[in-house]
Amino acid sequence: MRVDFSVFRQSLLEWFKREKRSLPWRTHPSLYGTVVSEFMLQQTQVETVLPYYANWLVTFPDFESLAKAGEAEVVKNWEGLGYYTRARNLHKLAKSICESGTPKTFDEWLNRPGIGPYSAAAISSIAQNIPEPVIDGNVIRVLCRINNDNLPIRSSTDGRKRLLPLARDLIDPDHPGDFNEAIMELGATVCRKSRPSCLLCPVKDHCQASACGNESSIPVIVRRATTRTSSSRLWLVRDDQILLHIYPEDAPRLAGLAELPQINVPKGIAPILKRTRGISTELITESIFLLDLNHPESIRCQDLDDSKWVPIHSLSTISLSGPHRRWIEALLRENLDSNIKPPRD
Ligand code: SF4
């Protein structure tokens, strides 16, 4: 089966016009809105992004206001979205645009902070009508199925390299932004990972995997093995203050953020809270312990040097990593008070 590019584009674009989800960055389009939404949507679901996007545009309505903000304020407004490097890069990008102007080509976008091939293609096509195809996980899935391509894909870089020629052939040169949004939307809502809705698909007539009944087994993604780690955290509350570890400004991922301090715990002590969470391919089991630092077994606290007592009433003003805020709020509701002396300065 040979794909008729112009019929494929027309079918996809007509479907998108009819079925696209109403999203704020679509109903009130702007370069700034496109940039913010693309940063927020990396590794995050649309439903999670929506309230953050709305708040962000109230607090930082344009590149200028974002560029002028302090990093702590930027990170605070990102709190709960995770992957905080995105917030810092978005801040740097706003500064770069205010200082050096707006990039005008795909390659110029690629040279700016936090922008990789996917973001450069998405922003330049959607906001500037530049015909550069986007290739994310959704697009990789759609294109592999269109081509009945069952060769293993080992990474997004691998997938992008392989599928770029087909994506370049397919993209509508007159409506590249709509085309890119449409093919991502198709992957997100119709050509889903499991049980794709082929009967509702606007490009079914061009799809070789569907014609061969292979849609559920394609693409063949080689997953990285999941690693399991664990971490012990200290719960120390006294005199309406809580002990928190503040990551220093040069910390790679969590600079300026607060978390419950990590500790080594003697054997035989049960945690007061235990949660497992996933970050990328890592599964982390976090256990929180209520301990007395003056205990004879002397707990060795790894990072109390960077910890400080924070008044509980001011917790809302500091940047806490999302899961830690949830755990702290849950434990505070239980009114657990360590009632022991703070560590000496
Ligand atoms: S026909 Fe099915 S497998 Fe093919 S692109 Fe459409 S939804 Fe995906």
Image (cartoon, grey):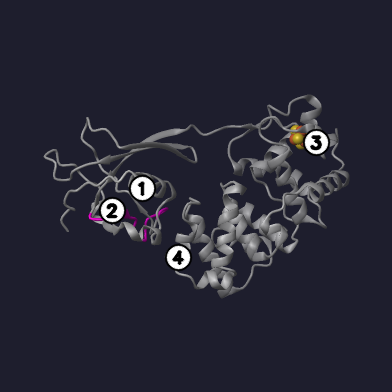
Residue sticking out furthest to the bottom: 99
Q: Which residue is mark 1?
A: 328
Q: Which sits earlier in the primary sequence, circle 3 or circle 1?
A: 3
Query: Disc 2 and disc 3: Cα gap in Å?
Result: 54 Å
Q: Is mark 2 within 8 Å of ligand 1?
A: no
Q: Is residue 154 left or right of residue 185?
A: left
Question: Which mark's residue is nearer the viewer, 2 or 3?
Answer: 2
**Does 261 appear above or below 74?**
above
Contact (CB < 8 A) between labels 3 and 1? Answer: no
What amino acid is found at the position of numbered circle 3 in the picture?
Leu
Identify the disc placed on residue 105: none
Contact (CB < 8 A) between labels 2 and 1? Answer: yes
Query: Disc 4 and disc 2: Cα gap in Å?
Result: 22 Å
Contact (CB < 8 A) between labels 4 and 2? Answer: no
Which residue is at the front of the view, 58 or 105? 58
Contact (CB < 8 A) between labels 1 and 4? Answer: no
Quadrant of the frame with the N terminus: top right
Residue drawn at (72%, 59%) of the image: 27
Region rendered in magenta? 239-254
**Residue 234 appears at what percent x and percent y?**
27, 45
Residue drawn at (81%, 32%) of the image: 199
Mark 4 neighbour density, 10 Å: few (under 14) some (14–19) many (20 or more):
some
Question: Which mark's residue is nearer the viewer, 3 or 1?
Answer: 1
Q: Which sits earlier in the primary sequence, circle 1 or circle 4?
A: 4
Which residue is at the front of the view, 218 or 63? 63
What amino acid is found at the position of numbered circle 1 in the picture?
Ile
